[in-house]
Image (spheres, rainbow, N blue to C red):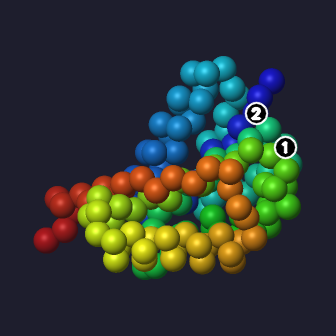
Amino acid sequence: MTRILVLYGTTEGQTGKIAEFLAGTTRACGAVVDLVDAAAHSPDADTYTAVVVAASVHAGGYQRAVRQWVQANAGALRNRPTAFVSVCLGVLQHDPAVDRELKTILDRFLAATGWQPGVTKIVAGSLPYTKYN
């Protein structure tokens, strides 16, 4: 049976919601899916058929726990199907300068971790206006 890991890092909670959706959709296709917050647990990538990693952009980078997990599991990630979901509200601006900045942040993360996911997707996060003055 296919066993898939959906590992995520979240700061405001939106990436966690996106990861939950990915896990639920994948389960509906018949896979066994483990949904793991990188800050709470560090599973071994070798025990999974495929891995999806989701993290959000904050202050020019992704969550430390995600970066550390990917670095520690980079060898295992090279030997299975993988995907990276980068969550950032800036993708909605459709501004070439912002797009370049997001690509730089993503490229810096991949270079630092030694990982090249099979699929990379940048998706929009959220801005909860009611939480701010």
Residue at 53% x, 30% y: name it. Answer: 24
Other-residue count near label 1 (Cα within 10 Å), few / some / many at <14 / 14–19 / ≥20: few
Residue at 66% x, 20% y: name it. Answer: 30
Write down the quadrant of residue 89 in the picture.
bottom left
In the image, is residue 49 above or below residue 79?
above
* Place of residue 133 in the rendered image (x, y in percent of width and height, measured from the top left): 13, 71
Specify the amino acid type for callout 1. Thr
Q: Which residue is mark 1?
A: 47
Mark 1 and 2 residues: CB-CB less than 8 Å, in contact?
A: yes
Q: Which residue is mark 2?
A: 3
Other-residue count near label 2 (Cα within 10 Å), few / some / many at <14 / 14–19 / ≥20: some
In the picture, measured across the screen, residue 133 lies left or right of residue 6, that is: left
Write down the quadrant of residue 112 in the picture.
bottom right
In the image, is residue 65 above or below residue 13?
below
* Place of residue 2 in the rendered image (x, y in percent of width and height, measured from the top left): 77, 29
Cα gap from disc 1 to disc 2, whole angstroms = 8 Å
* Place of residue 118 in the rendered image (x, y in percent of width and height, measured from the top left): 68, 51
In the picture, measured across the screen, residue 122 lies left or right of residue 74, that is: left
Q: Residue furthest front?
A: 96
Q: Nearer the viewer, residue 36 or 89?
A: 89
* SS for dot 2: strand
Can residue 78 be seen here? The reply is yes
Q: Nearer the viewer, residue 40 or 129?
A: 129
Q: Residue furthest left?
A: 133
Specify the amino acid type for callout 2. Arg
Residue at 73% x, 57% y: name it. Answer: 42
**How many marks do you count on the picture?**
2
* SS for dot 1: helix
In the picture, measured across the screen, residue 122 lies left or right of residue 34, that is: left
Residue at 81% x, 56% y: name it. Answer: 78
In the image, is residue 19 above or below residue 123?
above
First of labels 1, 2 by sequence position: 2
